[in-house]
Amino acid sequence: MNLGVQIVSFFVILTICFIYFSNKHIKLLSTKIYTVYLSVSVIFSVFELFSLYTLYNLNVDDPLNRLSHQLFVGSLILVLMFLFIYVDILSRKQKRYKPLELAVRILPCVFAYVMVIFGRFEYHIGADGRYSYGPVIVTLYCSLAVYAVWTIVTVIRRRKSFNPNTALPILFGVTGWITIGIVQSLNPAWLIESMGVSLMQLFIFLSIENPREYNDGDVRGALNRHAFEQMLNERCENGKSFYIVTFTLTNSELLKNSVGVDEVYRILSIAATNISKSLHSDFYHTADNSISFIEKHKKCCEELISSDFDKLEFSTSSGMIVNTSFRLSFIECPKYADSLDKITELMTHVRSADSNSARSVVVVSEAVIDELNYLSGVERLLQKAVKNNGLEVYYQPIYSTKKKKFVSAEALVRLKDKETLGFISPEIFVPMAERMGLISELGATVFESVCSFAKKYNVRQYGVEYIEVNISAVQSVDIYLPDYLLQCMGKYGISSDFFNLEITETAAVEAGELLDLNMSRLKSMGCGFSMDDFGTGYSNLSQMANTGFDIIKLDKSLIWPCFDGDSAHARTILDSCISMINGLGISIVAEGVETKEQVDMLTENGVEYLQGYYFAKPMNEQDYLKFLQDNCK
Ligand code: C2E
Ligand code: MG
Ligand code: MG
């Protein structure tokens, strides 16, 4: 008796089993069916060896011989039936079967089983080997052929719902198996069915069901983003309620810088493992500092909200104790998001909208959805405005305390359309334009508009020495910025010393060398620079002294507290800032000046320029022109 093929096939399937079951795999319905299909393949291999043993060692009439052949044939049909169901489920939109659909699919199997139980086995015993044949084996071949052809037809018909890496291996595997089946039926003594079973397993395991494809490489025990998306797709199609619970480590940047990124992933892993005990579900590494769960039961989520999850102490590998803070978000699906795209959009929104929030629990509600819809509306409006001349520039005059007149203005972008969504602050749409890759176009439009306005009305004649133009963080490191600005100034014949480019303190600190390059080129061309919003970021004082800003704009948050009830500390800070900046020979613009009291105090303290509602709000070109005409008399 030569069992080479059977033993090799048995070990191939056993190895697949070992790798498969020793890794975490995702709980998709298709994966669950694959697990059954794999288990049935192992059982088949054992029964095949058993049937060969009884055929060679017992009398053919021995009931044990008949039983072993019944088990062997019965398990082979199950292998093919589960392969077909697996492929069917993988490609169906509606994952669950209706009773009739299920009945049709198991019918060939039931038919073969009736024959297996009641039919007759014949045994060939000859010099070429031993094997079984007869009516049961014919029925077996028929039902195997039905499932094999059905599988191929399913793959071909639904090829669009498979990804190409999935459909081809299935087609190859099943075609190979059919070939093996035909060869086997023509040469019954060859006994090579098990080769077909193990080859098919290998194809599917390597191309679709290798659990390592779903394991996250960073956070131990977590499944990756791809696994998360697969699960969500299935849950959304299923239509039943579920909850996405996401934990975000809010102080992850600080921890990364102090204890390293590996420790941050370890902390996420420990926290998620603990939480998964109460949620009884897998966890997914969905963003750098976030872990998500997909939970069926609302009650578990509510228990989690009331638990002490948000402030935990962790011991690092080196024994250091670090404090962590987590934020928790809940999304009820499909109520608030019923597709993968919508869920992804909502998760990104919740993550970014609340990155500065002190709230440790965010439960997605109608209000959050309204906010998201509003922002989507703003995005559409912005997209249209940038493409179709929908932006305009307002000007807010800047007053010189030394010259006692308005010597400049800040150009501030506005969306023309105020009907659709009302007034939208540039604080909302400028960062949005950065994220959408529209900021260069937006910046270019603003700059060109300022050039065109300055030329058309020759604003210098009204004593305007320069205009402040805001440059966003992304623009400030764009290598084409200097060329563009130069070309635009050339087109309108405006000299470069008419512009002071404003870069926020935060951008100035974060942008580093690229900004230095742009700044030195633009400065050599004659442009001036202002550091905007001083006092809101983290000033690098030595950098401030060296990077050649001509003006520093004090943010209103440095000024306003000086006029609150208990203002001694705020005054000390403001006075020190003013004397330090003046000491460096840099001019100061105070922003947000709203009262006479503020004007007097800032003027007495040596602030050279003032900007704020006390003098004028930002206004459109015509109003600004009128303002200049009135104030320059
Ligand atoms: P910013 O550059 O610091 O501009 C000053 C902001 O303070 C303006 O808001 C202005 O209207 C407001 N403001 C001025 N005086 C007062 C006051 O007395 N009281 C109060 N409460 N507010 C005052 P705005 O126009 O909404 O702009 C907000 C931010 O949007 C700007 O802050 C700037 O960072 C950005 N931004 C505006 N236009 C542009 C642009 O063309 N390009 C870029 N990249 N960013 C822009
Ligand atoms: Mg500004
Ligand atoms: Mg500012």
Image: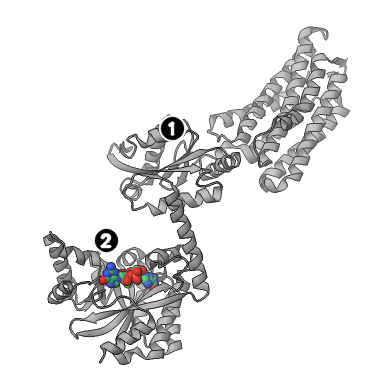
Asked whether the beta carbons under mark 2 and mark 1 sit within 8 Å of each other, the answer is no
Q: Specify whether 118 is left or right of 523.
A: right
In the image, is residue 599 above or below residue 71? below
Q: Which residue is mark 2?
A: 538
User: Residue at horizontal 59%, vertical 36%?
Assistant: 28
Residue under label 1, please give it.
299
Closer to the camera, 458 or 525?
A: 458
Specify the quadrant of the image occupied by residue 488.
bottom left
Where is residue 395? Give x, y as percent.
34, 79
> Which residue is at 19% across, 72% downward?
595
Marks 2, 1: nearer the viewer: 1
> What percent of the width, then of the height, locates residue 74?
75, 21
The residue at 62%/29% (across/down) is 35
What amino acid is at disc 1? Lys
Front-most of residues 106 and 240: 240
Q: Is 454 placed left or right of 162 in the picture?
A: left
